[in-house]
Image (cartoon, coloured by chain):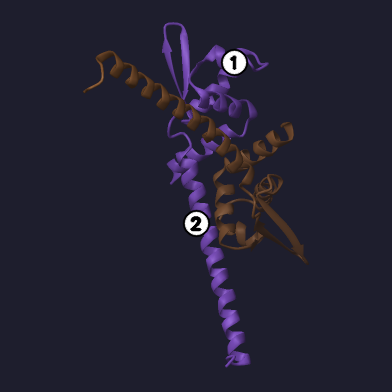
Chain colours: A purple, B brown
Amino acid sequence: MAKHDSTLDLLFTALGDPTRRAILMRLAQGDASVSELAAPHDMALPSFVKHLGKLEQAGLITTTKAGRVRSCALSPDAFAPMDDWLSAQRAIWNSRLDRFDDYVSNLKRMRENETGPEN
Amino acid sequence: MAKHDSTLDLLFTALGDPTRRAILMRLAQGDASVSELAAPHDMALPSFVKHLGKLEQAGLITTTKAGRVRSCALSPDAFAPMDDWLSAQRAIWNSRLDRFDDYVSNLKRMRENETGPEN
C-alpha cells in the first residue's frame, strides 16, 4: 500500500505542471530527443531536464542515450496506476449511487403500500 | 488555455498526496463532517484542514457550514477536467498507433508486391 501510494504521489505530482503535461502530449505523437522536446519551451536546459527527471521518476517516460543524444519516449503503461485509482474511486461512488437508488425505490414502495395498491 | 492549465495544476497536485486521496475515497462513500474525516488521520487539525482547503480549491470537494459543523462532499464533476486531459492524451497516442498500423500494412503490401502475388 505504501509503495503503491508513493507511485501515485509521484504520478499525480508529475502531472501537476503545465510544462510536464506539454512534454507528455508531445511524446504521445512520437519519441523525441531532449533538445527537440526543449525547443518550444522558454526555459533554461537544466530546469527543463529536471522536469524530464520528474516524469521519468514517475514512470511516465523512459529515456535512452545513443552517443551524445538522449531520446525520450512515453511509457506504454504510464497511466495504469492512475486508472486503477480512479476506477476504485468510481466504484465506491457508484455503489453509493446504487444504495441511494435502493433507498428511493424502498421509499416509493412504502408510500404505495401506505396508500394501498391501485386495483 | 492558461485558465484550464491552472485548473489541471490544482487538480493533479491535489491528488498527489495520500491523505487527500484517502479523504476523496471516504467522501465517495458519503458526505462527512470535518471531524469525521479527520478521525482516521494522525495529524493536527490545522494541517488536516489545509488538505481540505487544497481539495476545495481544486474543485474536488465542496464544504458547507451548518451551525458549528462543516460538512464536506465530493464534487460530482470533480474529475471531469482530468478525464478531458487524459482523453486528449490518449487520442494523440491512438492516432499514432493507427499511423504505425498503416505503416506496417504498407510495408507488408510492398513486400507482397516484391515477391509477387501468390496465385
Identity of the residue furthest to the right in this view: B67
Instruction: Determine whether A75 is above or below B63 in the image.
Output: above
Q: Which mark is residue A38?
A: 1
In this view of the protein, can residue A58 be seen by the observer? no
Q: Pinpoint the chain carrying mark 1.
A: A
- Residue A57 lies, in percent from the top left, at 48, 28
Q: Residue at x 53, y 14 (%)?
A: A34
Q: Which quadrant of the view contains residue A67?
A: top left
Q: Residue at x 51, y 63 (%)?
A: A95
Q: Which mark is residue A91?
A: 2
Name the kind of residue labelled 2 in the image: Ala
Q: Nearer the viewer, residue B47 or B95?
A: B95
Total number of numbered discs in the rendering: 2
- Residue A119 lies, in percent from the top left, at 57, 93
Horizontal side of A39 relative to A91 (left or right) equals right
Q: Pinpoint the chain carrying mark 2.
A: A
- Residue A17 lies, in percent from the top left, at 63, 30
Instruction: Determine whether B100 is above or below B82 in the image.
Output: above
- Residue B18 lies, in percent from the top left, at 54, 45
SS state under label 2: helix
Q: Nearer the viewer, residue A119 or B81?
A: A119
Name the kind of residue labelled 1 in the image: Ala
